[in-house]
Image: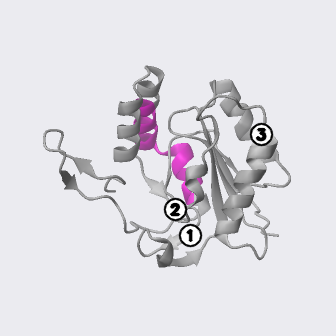
Amino acid sequence: MPPISPIKDENTGKTVKSATLTPFRTMSIDEVHRLITSDQRLAELTLAIRNAAAQGDETTARFLKQQTLPYVTPCGVFTRRRSDCLTESSGLVVVDIDHLESAEETENLRQQLFDDPYLCPALVFISPTGRGVKAFVPCLHGQNPAEGIQWAMNYVHCMYDTENTQPGKGVDTSGKDLVRACFLCHDPKALLREVVNFE
């Protein structure tokens, strides 16, 4: 799969390879879970990103994430990565919580979000750097995806982010766009809900 963000020549700053804007293929939530939990190549790519992040090299970690990891658009199927090109809504939105302080905090939040009776996420996994959690949350019945994104972000912020005082930590509000890419990474303990209730 081509990279999501443009590759630029280090000397000139010119783009040498365009960003990925058209879908490679459509995947089910089960396929996404299988990829996250068992793909060996994805495990190797994720380890390289986490090693860079652990060494404090955020630039390399971000570059590797953007240039090597596959991604999905959890809100639905698009002919092109533009909101007016949505062909089929998935009924899911993504909530991304970033910059958690430890692996333990990250693992605990993954389980808390999965167990939350109001969110009922279809899939929850640890993010590429190992210090964040991503949850694919079903929209409420009759809710459009934009409303679903706003509701899910507000809910997670109110329930799990109230004592946050660290800048950058918490719900990533930049993910309000329907076509927001969600990078996939290795998490052998990713949690998948067998039955998702869209009520």
- Identify which amino acid the numbered label 3 is placed on: Tyr
From the viewer's perspective, tell me whether residue 5 is left or right of residue 147.
left
- Identify which amino acid the numbered label 2 is placed on: Thr
From the viewer's perspective, tell me whether residue 74 is left or right of residue 50.
right
Residue situated in front as seen by the camera: 182 or 47: 182
Task: Say few, some or many: other residues with alpha carbon within 10 Å of mark 3 (under 14 / 14 to 19 / 20 or more).
Answer: some
**Which label's residue is closer to the chain start, 1 or 3?**
1
Measuring from the top left, give residue 19's x and y in whole percent. Answer: 31, 58
Q: Which residue is denoted by mark 3 in the rendering?
A: 160
Measuring from the top left, give residue 161's x and y in whole percent. Answer: 74, 38
Q: Which residue is denoted by mark 1 in the rendering?
A: 76
**Label 1 secondary element:** strand
- As drawn, the label of residue 50 is none
Mark 1 and 3 residues: CB-CB less than 8 Å, in contact? no
**Stretch of the chain drawn in magenta:** 31-49
Is 41 drawn above or below residue 35 in the view shown? above
Farthest top residue?
55
From the viewer's perspective, tell me whether residue 52 is left or right of residue 84.
left
- Identify which amino acid the numbered label 1 is placed on: Gly
**Quadrant assignment, res 76:** bottom right
Is 26 drawn above or below residue 132 in the view shown? below
Residue for point 41% across, 47% down: 69
- As drawn, the label of residue 73 is 2
**Label 3 secondary element:** helix
Residue for point 50% across, 43% down: 185
Residue for point 40% across, 38% down: 62
